């Protein structure tokens, strides 16, 4: 029987009564560790809302459910609902339930269901770790394993930075879905800033959040452990972690690091606060000493691998790490204990832990001024120096994030109570965006959560995590120094990632979310088990209630996860078959298997609809057309904002020659894609074509209806272009959005055919180009001059230029000017 970690023995005996020698307990612990290792190399289980990302997430659900079954067997006799701590394992079920509730108004059924499954993974991990981490031995093993896993990920990232792509790929390629053609995809992320280290995450900012959490965990573990070899290991890893953090070029990480640091310091005694400063400073000096040569070497090794240069870089890194580790060990061995003794009296004073964090905040401000406003930043390589120079509130990434948050608020206004379902931002952002950016993530976990589950779900989630943080800190402050440390890394882990998730989409990586909920479980394990008197339930009844709920959920989750895995495999097979076969029946058979399980799975549905479209094109068989239309209409009921489905349905109507249906769909969905320039250009063109046909048929009412819609669409583009001029100077517009010659010509014609020649001339004048040798440009000039002529006016300069290029245009202008509508 393990000894309880917190409080008196009589309070925690129940929770620690599982024997540490139990084979099932060891199986559960080892299984959890191996699961986390596997998960990290599946692109950290990124919820990328695409077919390629969903398979590993479904496997993660299977593994978590199996582990949960083992947990239920191991801890069955310990399940009770006596304390507030115990009720947390029921409270966590409210999180997936709020996502289930949001299905009512889900913008995408497919994405919403996936998020429910992800929330179930989190809930099961929370319950398991809350129990596992009450056991002193399993707590130690899991903590050590988490730190070891972090060190493996750091090493893996640096292998890629030093050009060993193939070697790194071979190490994990046998089990990792992230390895493509023998190389871990985007372990080095390239953008406008150049190569950025991303390791297993394929996104540098999330890797920076992960590194920051484990940087602080390493320092804490270094100070806490009494084992010399562990002090040396943790000290050795500080330089690689800090180096990796800088190589991510993450401005978010650099900005948020002082905030996280100060929060952690507030919970430490003065002696430990000073040690944190010293160790961070020493490792920082060691990192800066090798930063330039290692950074430059890495950039060169991305282009051309050189064994000599790579070896030299590793020597720099290892040497700096060894020196830092040795210096830190000396301080820890000879000075740390003496310092704690001397500062013991000061540490007992009220508010003593506040002075150093306040001083560190002041130092952070001074450092920021030096690094951002002076040439001190030139000690860093150019890539990092440039990133530091660009940190300001008028920088485009800051302005863009603020825009995301404002747009998210618009979504929340329309879906205030239960939200728009999991994945709502991805499905809806084009409808609400302020400018034509492309971002499937809101870059703020809390705003994205609020969009998905509304205020009911968000308040539930915040109440859950704030209760855990509050109770943990309360219990922490009431403990002796020696009792505080056993679960503190879980506070660091969850708090760091959540703070950095204020400015990024780190929690879209299910692996990161798993770490956060493991952190919640660790904190919950350390909470004093205060009894609940009003809701007291006998142990046997509590076991019955909880196992009944858990049993039903386990059965449902196993069935769903296995079926979804089958569907995912069928969808992949269909794509593979489509690449190698031209057989309609063969491709359709694989797609039908997926759609039999997930009837509106967008990938397979679109592929099958495309098959039907091709069949109709080749044979003109009405059955293909009807099947395609029915399939897409069914899909749009579940995925009403899926642009690809709408486009494909429009194409089918166009092939059939059903111009009214085609136009109605183009017009109906225009408000969902308010910055899609091509969408509005097509809508304006179709409005003109159909209006012109109605004009030829003498149907004035229809003509006016089509022309009004087309001119409204044109005005939408005009207003949009004017709005984009109001964007702050540093903010990027995003995708192109402008008035095209086709828009101007068709809008001008519609205005002219509506007997508004002056309005037509105003529109068409905006499209006059210098090069009138182009036929489209000449047509705009022709109609412009005709509109002026109709009103008895002339633009001699444009007229002369047009006639010089094409003399016959004079006759064309006269004929148009004489037309009456």
Image: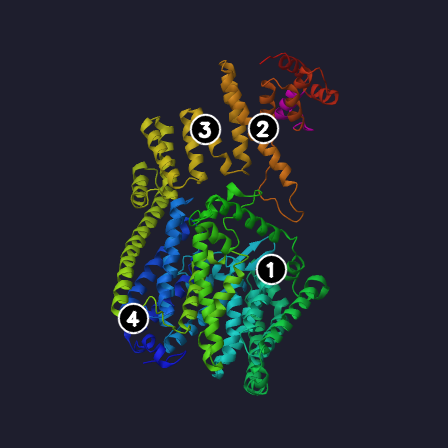
Color scheme of the displayed model = rainbow
Please state which of residues 776 and 427 is positioned toward the viewer in this rendering. 427
**Does residue 693 show up?**
no
Pick whichever of labels 4 and 3 is earlier in the sequence: 4
Q: CA distance from mark 1 to mark 3?
A: 46 Å
Q: Which residue is mark 3?
A: 664
Quadrant hosting residue 295: bottom right
Q: Residues within 10 Å of mark 1 (few under 14, many from 20)?
A: some
Q: Circles 2 and 1: CB distance less than 8 Å?
A: no
- Magenta residues span 767-784
Image coordinates for residue 619, horizontal then vertical, percent: 34, 27
Q: Which residue is mark 2?
A: 742
In the picture shown, does residue 9 fall above or below 431? below
Q: Left or right: where does residue 442 sit relative to residue 658?
A: right
Numbered badge on residue 251: 1
Q: CA distance from mark 2 to mark 1?
A: 42 Å
């Amino acid at each position: 029987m393990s000894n309880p970690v917190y409080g008196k023995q009589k309070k925690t005996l129940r929770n620690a009564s599982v024997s540490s020698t139990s084979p099932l307990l060891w199986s559960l612990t080892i299984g959890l560790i191996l699961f986390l290792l596997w998960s990290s190399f599946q692109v950290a289980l990124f919820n990328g809302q695409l077919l390629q990302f969903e398979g590993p997430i479904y496997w993660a659900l299977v593994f978590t459910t199996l582990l949960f079954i083992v947990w239920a067997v191991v801890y069955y006799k310990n399940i009770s609902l006596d304390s507030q701590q115990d009720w947390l394992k029921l409270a966590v079920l409210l999180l997936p339930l709020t996502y289930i509730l949001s299905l009512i108004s889900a913008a995408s059924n497919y994405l919403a269901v996936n998020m429910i499954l992800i929330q179930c993974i989190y809930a099961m991990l929370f319950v398991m770790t809350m129990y596992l981490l009450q056991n002193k031995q399993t707590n130690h093993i899991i903590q050590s394993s988490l730190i070891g896993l972090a060190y493996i990920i750091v090493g893996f990232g640096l292998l890629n930075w030093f050009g060993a792509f193939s070697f790194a790929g071979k190490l994990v390629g046998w089990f990792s879905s992230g390895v493509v053609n023998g190389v871990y995809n985007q372990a080095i992320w390239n953008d406008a800033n150049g190569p950025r280290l991303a390791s297993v995450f394929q996104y540098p900012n999330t890797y920076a959040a992960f590194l920051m959490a484990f940087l602080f965990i390493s320092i804490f573990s270094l100070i806490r452990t009494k084992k010399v070899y562990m002090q040396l290991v943790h000290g050795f890893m500080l330089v690689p972690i800090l180096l990796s953090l800088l190589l991510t070029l993450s401005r978010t990480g650099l900005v948020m690091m002082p905030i996280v640091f100060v929060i952690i310091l507030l919970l430490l005694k003065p002696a430990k606060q000073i040690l944190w400063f010293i160790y961070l400073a020493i490792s920082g000096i060691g990192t800066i000493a090798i930063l330039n040569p290692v950074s430059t070497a890495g950039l060169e090794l991305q282009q051309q691998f050189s064994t000599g240069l790579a070896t030299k870089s590793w020597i720099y890194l290892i040497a700096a790490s060894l020196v830092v580790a040795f210096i830190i060990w000396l301080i820890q061995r000879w000075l740390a204990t003496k310092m704690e003794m001397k500062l013991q009296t000061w540490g007992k004073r009220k508010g003593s832990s506040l002075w150093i964090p306040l001083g560190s905040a002041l130092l952070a401000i001074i450092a920021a001024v030096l690094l951002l406003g002076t040439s001190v930043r030139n000690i860093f390589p150019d890539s990092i120096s440039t990133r530091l120079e660009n940190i300001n509130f008028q920088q485009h990434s800051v302005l863009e994030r603020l825009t995301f948050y404002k747009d998210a608020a618009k979504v929340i206004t329309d879906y205030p109570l239960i939200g728009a379902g999991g994945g709502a931002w991805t499905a809806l952002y084009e409808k609400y965006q302020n400018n034509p950016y492309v971002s499937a993530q809101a870059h703020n976990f809390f705003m994205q959560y609020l969009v998905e589950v509304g205020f009911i779900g968000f308040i539930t989630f915040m109440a859950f995590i704030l209760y855990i943080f509050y109770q943990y800190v309360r219990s922490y402050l009431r403990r002796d120094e020696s009792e505080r440390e056993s679960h503190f890394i879980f506070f660091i882990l969850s708090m760091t990632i959540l703070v950095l998730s204020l400015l990024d989409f780190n929690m879209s990586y299910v692996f990161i979310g798993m770490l956060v909920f493991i952190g919640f479980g660790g904190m919950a394990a350390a909470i004093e088990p205060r009894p609940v008197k009003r809701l007291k339930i006998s142990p046997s009844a509590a076991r019955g209630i909880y196992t009944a709920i858990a049993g039903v959920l386990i059965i449902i989750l196993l069935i769903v996860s296995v079926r979804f895995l089958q569907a995912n495999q069928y969808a992949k097979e269909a794509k593979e078959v489509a690449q190698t076969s031209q057989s309609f029946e063969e491709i359709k058979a694989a797609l039908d298997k997926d759609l039999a399980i997930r009837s509106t799975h967008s990938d397979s549905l679109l592929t099958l609809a495309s098959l039907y479209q091709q069949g109709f094109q080749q044979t003109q068989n009405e059955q293909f057309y009807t099947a395609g239309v029915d399939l897409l209409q069914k899909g749009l009921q579940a995925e009403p904002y899926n642009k690809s489905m709408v486009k494909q349905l429009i194409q089918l109507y166009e092939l059939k020659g059903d111009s009214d249906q085609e136009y109605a769909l183009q017009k109906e969905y225009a408000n969902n894609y308010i910055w899609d320039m091509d969408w509005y250009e097509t809508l304006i063109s179709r409005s003109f074509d159909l209006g012109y046909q109605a004009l030829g048929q003498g149907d004035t009412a229809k003509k006016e209806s089509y022309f009004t819609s087309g001119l409204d669409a044109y005005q939408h583009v005009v207003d949009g272009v004017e709005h984009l001029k109001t964007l702050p100077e540093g903010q990027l517009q995003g995708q192109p959005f402008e008035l095209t010659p086709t828009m101007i010509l068709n809008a001008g014609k519609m205005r002219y055919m509506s007997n508004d020649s002056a309005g037509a001339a105003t529109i068409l004048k905006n499209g006059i180009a210098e090069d009138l040798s182009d036929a489209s440009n000449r047509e705009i000039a022709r109609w412009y001059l005709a509109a002026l002529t109709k009103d008895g006016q002339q633009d001699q300069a444009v007229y002369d230029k047009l006639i010089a290029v094409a003399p016959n245009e004079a006759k064309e202008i006269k004929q148009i000017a004489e037309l009456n509508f």
